[in-house]
Image (cartoon, grey):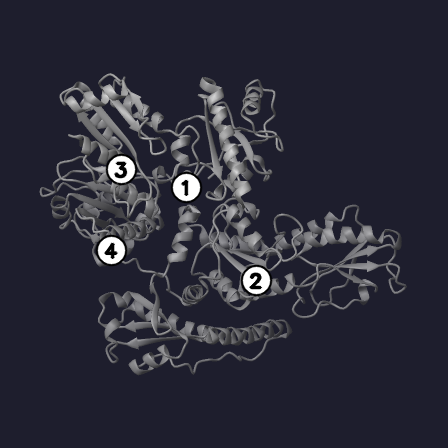
């Protein structure tokens, strides 16, 4: 830690040189004082081990074979050595032909990877695709150093939590970069390294936070905002945008400007006031005039205007009561631009907001060319890359530099796939694209699931993956005589299929995370349905938790009761059970055992017993009339539904699919025992709404969101009403008849009878909407099409062989242009 502090001190000294460079730039240039060509770049094996023990971080590439691409990379690596030395990072290469480091030079994958070491141990590895030039190398390495300091937020709710945590302590510097590894990304990371102890830095790459910041639509330019949280004036920290193109120098100047006084008071004529000195010499000055009679009012007005001009100009309040002020009374404002020889210009304004318009208009003119150049550079960029769900981008950003450990899964090829499927009881296969963000996220989850299954010694599950960028014939489902199963071409990436010998293929349609995938696989292992032959089997099925070391809750269960195995309803039940595989455990009872159960429950055969996880197993729901598989499935889903379900990000899609209006209660996190009791009483009242309302409540889904467990609910509530109301809050939304959102009167006790009366007033059109649902959704930004078919048509026979090395880059580009993520992993709703 001592080395880290001394490095930061050294870096601060380096930034004094940056400040000096700023000054030199404005007075006509300076000599090159940053020449570091004497750096030793190539390490011997002895050098390498010595540097590992130096206490500094070491960034090393182990050179084995040199190609054109590697030569270009080494040139960029050498440039980065000059930069990273100021941050205490030693950079170099080791020629494995001359200097042998056995643990690295012997690995075949090393030629595509660079390594960062800390405290004599490997800290991170970077694929050369992510550290391709000096900007990406510097930004990636600095992020590794600052990974615990630079935060990532993906929603306005997350940002609000962070604002509250630093309130009164630190200001926030929030940077948006359109792409990682760029010059703008490097600028933010270098600045964060120097100022990290003074400000809280946040980095985002898109997502809902941009709407809060006033950015609508795809942004072409990277941007920075300063959130004034140290002395906040409102619930949210006031923010100031940096309005110049993002670079190290502009960001440094911007932060210096944010430290300048909000308002200065002077007693001299504007013409006698000197121009701003370093580091504010490029900042315009604005003058407002104050009269003795209205001094406090003028001061308050000036402070309001100063907030609007923050980052645009420095505001001064000129007191006319001073005899030194000679400006005629007819003028109430003045300004001076930073250009050489610029004189003070005096104005008579009816509305002081005209000053804001003046500087915003000037700024727009200056930045117009920058915007046009940026648009030209980005015109061919795949827009879908910028519109991925921000949760995925965040996950990739935090885990970038980590090469996924694939020991727990098997990489299948066209040759190995048939045997792998035939020889395993259950084969889980991920079909993915190596360069696709969503694919990488799901690959990480699959790998973690494989590790957990192996640790728990759960056999008969073969975890595997197929890279569809490499094995196009397999993913296109080309006919293979040795393939024990047939499946449709994979056109949705990533896709997970479960294969069993002599059984239909099962598809995973859940969330991308590790826990949902693990649960799905565990619930897919048992036979469907399980045939129970005695009372011990029944008890074990109903009360046993499958793999308690991996699952912390009971799954839903269904049991079919039939007089005989040949009953016509058995086939319908079996098909329904197969459709529910992975979600529900199913069992079948027939003959004498089924008759005994029916007698105990006073039901007639056949009957389907539904045991939701939230309900006591002694009181199942009983379904006795079903005419088809779809009819039975709809009845099972209805019986599984909790009478007052808690909404989470994971459960929301299934509840919205019911097509009911949501009567939605928002409750806050319990801070003490009193808060816990209050929330319990609220839920009891909402249960009373369901019970008292009876059939009248059928069009509504009465539910609730706990904002402590589901922070995204804050953004949802804010989007419904346009502001955050006091909690608890009760709203009616997603009405089939329109987009209106109704709010139960705030500060009114939530009681069952009162809620029912309020609902009646809504139905009678006697209540006014409090907000409207957004009509935008998260539909794919590019229409999806079958790119494998397109490529096969362009190059006949291309899909029947592994992609030659020389053509892989061309294939990658085609796939990147054509591939978008299907909606089945996360239904499209603007609220969550």
- In the image shown, does 68 or 589 lie closer to the viewer? 589
Identify the residue position indicated by label 1 in the image.
Answer: 781
Residue at point 25% right, 35% down?
581
> Which badge, 4 or 3, comes first in the chain's sequence?
3
Residue at numbered disc 2? 199
Contact between labelled residues 3 and 4, with CB atoms less than 8 Å apart: no
* Mark identifier at residue 582: 3
- Is there CB contact under 8 Å for labels 4 and 1? no
Q: Please report contact status of discs 1 and 3: CB closer than 8 Å, yes or no.
A: no
Q: Secondary structure at mark 4?
A: helix
Which is more foreground, mark 4 or mark 1? 1
Q: Which badge, 2 or 3, comes first in the chain's sequence?
A: 2
Other residues around mark 3 within 10 Å, as few (<14) / some (14–19) / many (≥20): many
Q: Indicate which disc, 1 or 2, sits on the residue closer to the N terminus.
A: 2
Percent x, y for residue 421?
15, 45
Q: Name the residue at 31% across, 28% down.
A: 618
N-term mark: 1 or 3: 3
User: Residue at label 4?
Assistant: 807
> Helix, strand or loop at disc 2?
strand
């Amino acid at each position: 830690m001592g080395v880290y502090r001394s490095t930061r001190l050294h870096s601060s000294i380096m930034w004094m040189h940056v400040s000096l460079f700023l000054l030199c730039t404005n007075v006509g240039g300076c000599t090159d004082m940053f020449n570091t060509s004497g750096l030793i770049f190539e390490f011997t094996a002895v050098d390498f081990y010595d540097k590992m023990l130096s206490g500094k971080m070491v960034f090393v590439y182990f050179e084995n074979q040199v190609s054109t691409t590697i030569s270009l990379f080494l040139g960029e690596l050498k440039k980065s050595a000059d930069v990273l030395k100021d941050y205490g990072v030693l950079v170099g290469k080791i020629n494995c032909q001359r200097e042998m480091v056995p643990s690295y030079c012997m690995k075949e994958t090393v030629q595509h990877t660079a390594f960062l070491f800390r405290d004599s141990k490997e800290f991170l590895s970077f694929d050369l695709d992510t550290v391709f030039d000096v900007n990406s190398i510097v930004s990636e390495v600095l992020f590794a150093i600052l990974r615990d300091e630079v935060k990532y937020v993906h929603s306005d709710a997350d940002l609000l939590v962070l604002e509250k945590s630093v309130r009164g302590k630190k200001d926030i510097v929030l940077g948006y970069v359109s792409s990682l590894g760029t010059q703008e990304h490097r600028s933010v990371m270098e600045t964060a390294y120097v100022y990290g102890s003074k400000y809280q830095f946040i980095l985002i790459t898109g997502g809902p936070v941009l709407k809060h910041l006033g950015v609508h639509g795809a942004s072409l330019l990277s941007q920075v905002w300063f959130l004034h949280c140290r002395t906040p004036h409102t619930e949210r920290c006031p923010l100031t945008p940096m309005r110049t193109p993002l670079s190290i120098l502009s960001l440094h100047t911007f932060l210096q400007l944010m430290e300048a006084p909000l308002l200065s008071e002077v007693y001299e004529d504007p013409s006698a006031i000197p121009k701003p000195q370093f580091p504010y010499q490029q900042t315009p000055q604005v003058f407002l005039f104050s009269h003795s009679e209205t001094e406090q009012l003028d001061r308050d007005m000036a402070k309001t205007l100063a907030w609007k001009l923050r980052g645009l100009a420095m505001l001064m309040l000129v007191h006319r009561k001073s005899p030194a002020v000679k400006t005629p009374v007819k003028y109430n404002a003045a300004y001076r631009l930073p250009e050489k020889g610029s004189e003070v210009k005096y104005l008579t304004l009816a509305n002081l907001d005209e000053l804001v318009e003046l500087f915003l208009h000037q700024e727009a003119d200056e930045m117009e060319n920058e915007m046009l150049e940026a648009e030209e550079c980005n015109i061919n960029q795949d827009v879908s890359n910028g519109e991925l769900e921000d949760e995925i981008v965040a996950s990739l950003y935090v885990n970038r530099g980590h090469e996924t450990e694939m020991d727990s899964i098997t990489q299948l090829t066209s040759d190995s796939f048939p045997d792998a499927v035939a020889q395993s009881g259950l084969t889980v296969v991920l079909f993915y694209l190596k360069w696709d963000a969503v694919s990488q996220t799901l690959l990480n989850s699959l790998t973690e699931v494989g590790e957990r299954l192996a640790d728990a010694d759960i056999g008969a599950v073969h975890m595997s993956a197929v890279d569809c960028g490499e094995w196009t014939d397999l993913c296109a489902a080309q006919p293979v005589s040795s393939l024990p199963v047939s499946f449709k071409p994979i056109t949705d990436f990533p896709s997970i299929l479960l294969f069993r010998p002599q059984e239909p293929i099962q598809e995973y349609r859940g969330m991308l995370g590790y826990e949902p995938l693990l649960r799905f696989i565990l619930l897919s292992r048992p036979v469907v349905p399980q045939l129970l032959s005695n009372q011990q089997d029944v008890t074990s099925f109903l009360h046993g938790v499958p793999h308690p070391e991996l699952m912390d809750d009971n799954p839903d269960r269904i049991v079919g009761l039939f007089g005989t195995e040949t009953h016509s309803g058995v086939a319908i039940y079996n098909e329904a059970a197969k459709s529910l595989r992975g979600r529900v455990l199913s069992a079948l009872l027939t003959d004498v055992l089924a008759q005994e159960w029916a007698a105990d429950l006073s039901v007639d055969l056949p009957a389907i017993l539904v045991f939701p996880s939230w309900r006591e197993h002694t009181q199942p729901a009983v379904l006795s009339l079903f005419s088809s598989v779809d009819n039975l499935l709809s009845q099972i889903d209805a019986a599984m539904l909790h009478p007052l379900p808690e909404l989470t990000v994971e459960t929301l899609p299934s509840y919205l699919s019911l097509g009911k209006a949501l009567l939605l209660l928002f409750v806050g996190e319990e801070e003490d025992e009193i808060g816990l009791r209050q929330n319990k009483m609220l839920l009891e009242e909402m249960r009373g709404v369901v019970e008292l309302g009876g059939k009248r409540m059928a069009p509504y889904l009465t539910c609730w969101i706990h904002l402590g467990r589901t922070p995204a609910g804050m953004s949802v509530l804010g989007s419904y009403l346009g502001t955050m109301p006091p909690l608890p809050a009760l709203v009616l939304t997603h009405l089939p008849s329109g987009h209106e959102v109704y709010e139960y009167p705030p500060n009114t006790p939530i009681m069952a009878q009162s809620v029912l009366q309020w609902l009646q007033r809504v139905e009678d059109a006697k209540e006014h909407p409090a907000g409207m649902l957004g009509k935008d959704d998260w539909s794919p930004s590019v229409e999806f099409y079958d790119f494998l078919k397109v490529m096969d048509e362009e190059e006949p026979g291309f899909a029947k062989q592994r992609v030659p090395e020389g053509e892989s880059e061309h294939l990658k580009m085609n796939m990147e242009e054509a591939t978008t993520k299907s909606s089945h992993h996360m239904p499209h709703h603007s609220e969550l």
